[in-house]
């Protein structure tokens, strides 16, 4: 009999829990809490800028608590979708600039008044473009990043490399020298740490050779990674993989490439400005490398030129589900104002305003990235583009090339067809 | 007499015979009513729970599978009816059929290995000394107690590209050069790792259940068979196996249901970005829904998956009922 009572009690408890979670999901948040989703890059790279913004905001709104929740690039859109569907999305969300179009087109964000935000006249043009859809502004530029080659000066010197390479051909030769000097006795050494899924680096070759991921003709997109120029570029990518002993199926963030570099078995890697100080982090990195690190822009296959770098960046947007629109805008103002942006730039990024570009050029640790940023490429501007990213089309192609499971041509053709299909879906 | 009229002719005729007084008759029928409804009343809470957590979401899933439901519709909480277009789209998608085949093969391999190894260890438990049995059972229970995510991370560390224990051990044993061996570069070796992980995690439940069932096999039957000259394998096949058939049927059908919907293991091990070589049906449905924002397509794949599993369950339920009839 007791067992039956217990079972009945359990059942009631289960029901109560189910009812509780059901109502918990839809309960309205107190207006005194502002939820902000930032990527963990901010947590690793520029926590001071976040703290600064929170202090500024708190001074204006002493009764509002800011809850900054750090997300990862791999899962934040899934969570955002769930939040939008359940009416529980954050008040402010950081979006990658390649992710914006799809969400703006779907009506996921509130339109914003440009004049209300600091430095709006001098915003970086590339970032501002990613915040606009049908003539309206749905996001505020946050920061941009350019990648350059971050390398070990001591290893370059020991391998007999007198100056940093000025052409792709020279870069390959130099990498060969590093492999000869260090890679023979240490089978874990990489002259260039290049994980198989690192498409931001690989696609730079494609744009350097004058090719692109997709082209638009008569309103239709067509994948173009199997064009002769793109194939020539991807063959160079395949050569570059030979100087790397990074995982052929891994990517640049798992593990963080700067931290692998800090372990000492890497001659160079292609990273964002913030990854330089991150490699020197007291806890995770190796501060003793401070005197033997430097950076240079990726050299082009045309001698003397730079290879274009992916114009990565982030914007801040306000989801339509928010009930705290003006508070959200105030927090964005605090975080994208000159003081916080100065801190963001100081830690290795390109600030959202051209006013602060001089800051980068004058700092030797930022100048190589500022130089690299002069030549950049961007993904096809289709609302479906992010689906190509999320379907891992480029990553899968690169893994096949890196591991030799398919020829460059076969891998590129299959990826190109997939890109054509995805970009034209619903068009 | 007029009071009895509504209770029907049968009751009335009993009353006319004068065996039961009218007042008792009424109490009797009320009790009978209570007895008849009691099981349903008691089932109501469970039915309500199932309705809330299973039937309603399933209804929404089926409804969504007939709708165009992308990000645009998601934000407006309003899908657009497209009939069977989603199903037509997945049935014409060669990737979908590759995924179905992969999932079926993977499930078959995992379930077969789990059942054979689990039963073998259970038989071993009968033969060993008490202490070995306790040690082995403790080990099995510990494996069983490890949450999936923790288990995946332990395995992930073992097969890690750079610092993996497996690579180190295999190299030290001179089985080959496994320094910086990438287990996931080739989907066959990748799926071998996943098979190992899933079978490892599933064996304890099978072994402990089969062992408990084996303890119920009457010793006289085994002895009689031995006296009749049957060899151990024949005894197992002719005596033990038929007796344990109901248990095996239940365990196999449960294993199929579990292994068919494998998700977390692959998802977590491959950093939430598995390449298409690693798509199982569960991952493909998730990918279509949450990564491509085609929730209608994802729902259609999920519905097909539910039908597959329902078919498997139905088949085994029928088998089980038949076994019951023989007894």
Image: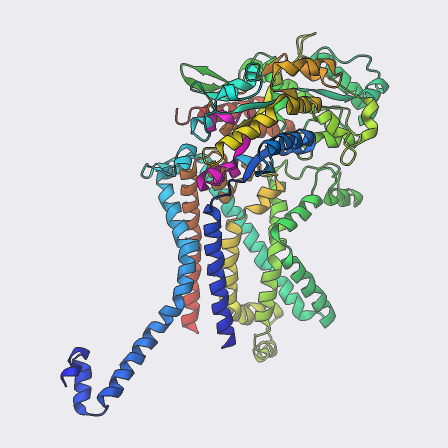
Q: Which residues are magenta?
A: A78-103
Please give the name of the residue rendered at 17% of the width and 78% of the height, measured from the top-left corner.
B6
Among the 4 quarters of the image, the one containing residue A401: top right
Instruction: Say if the magenta span includes residue A101.
Output: yes
- The tally of labels here is 0
Quadrant of the frame with the C terminus of chain A: top left
**Residue A195 horizontal/vertical position (percent):** 67, 29
**Residue A20 horizontal/vertical position (percent):** 48, 54
Instruction: Say if the magenta span includes residue A134.
Output: no
Q: Is residue A388 visible?
A: yes
- Residue pushed farthest right? A158
In front: B210, or A407?
B210
**Residue B323 horizontal/vertical position (percent):** 44, 68
In front: A139, or A253?
A139
B263 in relation to A19, above or below:
above
**Residue A404 horizontal/vertical position (percent):** 63, 28
In front: A95, or A171?
A95
Q: Is residue A80 left or right of residue A184?
A: left
Among the 4 quarters of the image, the one containing residue B30: bottom left
B65 in relation to A250, above or below:
below
Q: Is residue A382 left or right of residue B222?
A: left
Q: Is residue A270 left or right of residue B241?
A: right
Q: Is residue A249 visible?
A: no
Identify the coloring: rainbow
């Amino acid at each position: 009999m007791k067992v039956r009572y217990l079972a009945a009690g359990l059942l009631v408890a289960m029901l109560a829990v189910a009812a509780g979670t059901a109502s918990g999901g839809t309960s309205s948040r107190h207006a005194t809490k502002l939820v902000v989703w930032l990527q963990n890059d901010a947590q690793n790279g520029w926590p001071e800028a976040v703290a600064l913004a929170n202090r500024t905001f708190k001074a204006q709104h002493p009764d509002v608590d800011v809850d900054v929740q750090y997300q990862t690039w791999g899962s934040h859109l899934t969570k955002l979708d769930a939040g939008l569907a359940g009416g529980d999305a954050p008040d402010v969300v950081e979006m990658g600039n390649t992710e914006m179009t799809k969400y703006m087109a779907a009506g996921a964000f509130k339109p914003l008044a440009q004049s209300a935000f600091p430095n709006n006249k001098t915003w970086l043009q590339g970032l501002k473009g990613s915040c606009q859809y049908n003539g309206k502004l749905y996001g505020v530029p946050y920061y941009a990043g350019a990648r350059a080659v971050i390398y070990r000066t001591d290893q370059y010197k020991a391998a007999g490399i007198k100056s940093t390479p000025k052409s792709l051909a020279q870069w390959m030769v130099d990498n060969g020298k590093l492999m000869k000097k260090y890679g023979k006795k240490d089978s874990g050494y990489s002259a260039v740490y290049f994980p198989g899924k690192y498409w931001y680096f690989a696609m730079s070759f494609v744009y350097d050779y004058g090719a692109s991921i997709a082209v638009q003709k008569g309103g239709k997109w067509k994948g173009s990674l199997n064009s002769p120029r793109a194939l020539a570029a991807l063959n160079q990518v395949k050569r570059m993989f030979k100087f790397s002993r990074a995982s052929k199926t891994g990517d640049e963030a798992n593990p963080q490439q700067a931290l692998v570099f800090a372990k000492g078995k890497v001659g160079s890697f292609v990273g964002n400005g913030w990854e330089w100080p991150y490699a020197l982090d007291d806890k995770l990195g190796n501060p003793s490398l401070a005197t033997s690190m430097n950076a240079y822009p990726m050299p082009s296959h045309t001698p003397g030129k730079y290879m274009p770098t992916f114009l990565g960046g982030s914007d801040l947007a306000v989801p339509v589900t928010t009930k705290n629109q003006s508070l959200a805008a105030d927090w964005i103002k605090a975080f994208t104002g000159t003081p916080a942006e100065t801190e963001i730039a100081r830690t290795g990024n390109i600030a959202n305003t051209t006013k602060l570009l001089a800051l980068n050029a004058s700092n030797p640790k930022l100048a190589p990235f500022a130089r690299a940023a002069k030549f950049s490429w961007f993904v096809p501007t289709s609302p479906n583009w992010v689906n190509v990213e999320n379907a891992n089309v480029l990553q899968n192609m690169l893994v096949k090339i890196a591991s030799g499971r398919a020829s460059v041509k076969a891998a590129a053709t299959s990826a190109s067809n997939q890109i054509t299909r995805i970009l034209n879906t619903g068009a | 007499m007029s009071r009895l009229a509504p209770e029907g002719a049968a009751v009335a005729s009993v009353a006319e015979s004068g065996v039961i007084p009218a007042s008792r008759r009424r109490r009797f029928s009320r009790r009978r009513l209570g007895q008849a409804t009691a099981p349903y009343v008691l089932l109501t809470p469970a039915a309500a729970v199932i309705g809330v957590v299973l039937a309603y979401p399933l209804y929404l899933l089926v409804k969504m599978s007939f709708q165009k439901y992308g990000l645009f519709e998601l934000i407006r909480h309003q899908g657009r009816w497209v009939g069977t277009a989603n199903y037509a789209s997945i049935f014409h998608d060669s990737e979908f059929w590759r995924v179905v085949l992969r999932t079926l093969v993977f499930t078959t391999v995992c379930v077969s290995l789990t059942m054979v190894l689990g039963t073998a260890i259970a038989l071993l438990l009968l033969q060993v000394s008490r202490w070995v049995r306790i040690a082995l059972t403790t080990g099995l229970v510990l494996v069983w107690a490890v949450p999936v995510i923790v288990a995946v991370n332990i395995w992930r560390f073992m097969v890690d590209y750079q610092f993996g224990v497996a690579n180190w051990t295999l190299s030290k044993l001179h089985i080959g050069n496994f320094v910086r061996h990438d287990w996931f570069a080739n989907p066959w070796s990748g799926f071998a790792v996943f098979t190992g992980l899933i079978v490892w995690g599933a064996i304890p439940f099978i072994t402990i259940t089969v062992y408990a069932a084996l303890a119920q096999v009457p010793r006289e039957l085994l002895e009689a068979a031995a006296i009749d000259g049957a060899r151990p394998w024949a005894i197992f096949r002719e005596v033990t196996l038929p007796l344990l058939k109901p248990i095996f049927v239940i365990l196999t059908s449960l294993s199929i249901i579990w292994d068919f919907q494998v998700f977390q293991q692959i998802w977590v091990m491959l950093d939430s970005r598995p390449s298409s070589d690693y798509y199982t049906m569960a991952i493909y449905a998730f990918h279509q829904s949450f990564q491509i924002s085609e929730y209608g397509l994802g729902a259609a794949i999920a519905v097909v998956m539910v039908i597959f599993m329902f078919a498997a369950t139905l088949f085994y339920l029928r088998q089980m009922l038949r076994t019951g009839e023989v007894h």
